[in-house]
Image: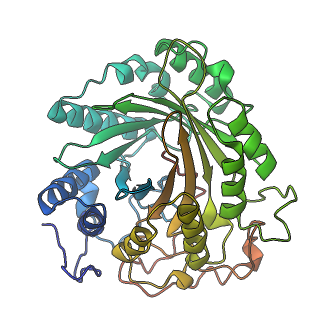
């Protein structure tokens, strides 16, 4: 049963992960302008994708140490903003999060994705081409497969699949990415990618996309604003000045540091390079992802930086504040990580998009830090890590947070 409240606050009495997440999604769907019928359809899809863990009590620890979020909730939301429109809502889920092994996790995830494709009339031929690369008998790494649903009117979402280039070993990640691009017809694409400190994800668009993308995520340790701009400038059509400003804003550079080249000292930035044409190796999309929750004292700061980015690009900021209260009743100043990432997406021939990644926080609210960004917040300078923010969704058992690099564009 999907629990909900018309006042937009937290539903009392939700004891299971699936009901808790579905209730959050129902409220977010309203903010994204989806009608009640579509919202309930998508809430049921989310519960089905979670499988047996949907009925798992929140009084228990997370079903696994999912890499998808800091508190290991296997669900994350994102809102993608464009000028003059309601934000596009997405939900990211790890279907095999309760599996006994990474191999089983992958099998469950593939089964769920293929069932979705069958239900909605999507082809999985691109995914089928890559199965041996990303689903070996003894996979390695931090994930097997995630799926993201971009929710739209009509009850049929767009589907995105996230794969792990390190499945055959981190030392073969570049080889795996190159081979995957080759098989998909993008034989010049790998050479267009920038130098990388790692390849955390390769993603595929499945379903009814105007121009289906193959997306390669690249990790950049200790990135500076100037370097972020240079990454955007590698290919024509991307605004390097916008990328540099976005970097400085998301990382929390104040006027005193605006002109220097301070580097991110905590979780790394990611860039995503999207390919839609096989006739050339040039990417048609570039996204800069900043792990904002690692560079703020609390979510009030993360919200303020998000608002600055939205205003700069002429986007509606009110939906973001509403989305935060749709997910939790806690004050933004009481925790850090509700807004996990900020991203600026540029696609050739389209207006920029700003995406905010919203954590479910089903199990834990990380406490605020006591020192400001732009440098990362060292563990010894954070608030008492044993402190728990009082909220109905929290598990009383302290959960050690993972080092998530989430993610989607």
- Of 342 and 404, nearer the camera is 342
Give the quarter of the image for residue 229.
top right
Residue that appears at 42% across and 35% down: 103
Task: Report x, y in % for residue 282.
Answer: 60, 22
318 horizontally vs 255: left or right: left
Residue that appears at 86% across and 55% down: 261
Q: Is residue 197 visible?
A: no
Residue that appears at 61% across and 66% down: 293
Give the quadrant of the N terminus: bottom left
- Of 80 and 161, nearer the camera is 80
13 horizontally vs 324: left or right: left
Residue that appears at 23% across and 83% down: 7
Judged from this view, the residue extending furthest toward the bottom is 390
Q: Is residue 294 visible?
A: yes
Task: Report x, y in % for residue 201.
Answer: 54, 37
331 horizontally vs 152: left or right: right
Task: Report x, y in % for residue 141.
Answer: 56, 39
Task: Report x, y in % for residue 192.
Answer: 67, 23
Give the quarter of the image for residue 299.
bottom right
Snapshot colouring: rainbow
- Of 53 and 283, nearer the camera is 283
Query: From the viewer's perspective, is residue 147 above or below residue 37?
Result: above
Query: From the viewer's perspective, is residue 82 above or below residue 380?
Result: above
Count of labels shown? Answer: 0
């Amino acid at each position: 049963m999907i629990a909900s409240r018309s006042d937009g606050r937290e539903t009392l009495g939700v004891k299971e992960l699936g009901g808790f997440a579905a209730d959050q999604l129902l409220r977010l769907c309203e903010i994204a302008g989806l009608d009640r019928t579509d919202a309930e359809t998508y809430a049921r899809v989310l519960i089905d994708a979670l499988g047996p863990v949907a009925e798992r009590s929140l009084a228990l620890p997370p079903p696994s140490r999912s890499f998808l979020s800091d508190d290991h909730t296997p669900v994350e939301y994102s809102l993608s903003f464009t000028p003059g429109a309601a934000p596009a809502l997405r939900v990211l889920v790890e279907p095999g999060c309760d599996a006994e092994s990474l191999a089983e996790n992958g099998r469950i995830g593939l089964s769920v994705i293929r069932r979705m494709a069958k239900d909605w009339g999507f082809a999985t031929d691109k995914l089928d081409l890559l199965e041996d690369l990303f689903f070996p008998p003894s996979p390695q790494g931090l994930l097997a497969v995630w799926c993201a649903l971009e929710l739209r009117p009509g009850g049929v979402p767009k589907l995105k699949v996230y794969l792990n280039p390190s499945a055959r070993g981190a030392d073969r990640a570049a080889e795996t990415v190159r081979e995957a691009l080759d098989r998909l017809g993008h034989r010049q694409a790998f050479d267009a990618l920038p130098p990388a400190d790692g390849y955390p994800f390769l993603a595929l668009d499945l379903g009814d996309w105007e121009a289906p993308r193959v997306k390669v995520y690249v990790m950049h340790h200790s990135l500076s604003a100037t370097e972020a701009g240079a990454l955007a400038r590698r290919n024509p059509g991307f605004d390097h000045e916008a990328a540099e400003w976005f970097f400085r804003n998301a990382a929390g550079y104040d006027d005193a540091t605006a002109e220097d080249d301070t580097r991110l000292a905590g979780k790394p930035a990611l860039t995503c390079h999207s390919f839609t044409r096989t006739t050339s190796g040039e990417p048609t999309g570039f996204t800069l992802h900043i792990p904002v929750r690692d560079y703020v004292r609390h979510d009030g700061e993360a919200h303020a930086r998000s608002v600055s980015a939205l205003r700069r690009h002429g986007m509606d900021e009110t939906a973001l504040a509403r989305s935060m209260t749709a997910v939790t009743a806690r004050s933004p100043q009481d925790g850090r990580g509700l807004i996990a990432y900020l991203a600026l997406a540029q696609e050739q021939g389209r207006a920029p998009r700003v995406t905010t990644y919203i954590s479910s926080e089903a199990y834990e609210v990380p406490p605020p830090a006591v020192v400001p960004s732009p440098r990362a917040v060292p563990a010894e300078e954070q608030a008492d890590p044993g402190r728990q923010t009082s909220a109905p969704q929290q598990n009383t058992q302290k959960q050690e947070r993972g080092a998530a690099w989430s993610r989607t564009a």
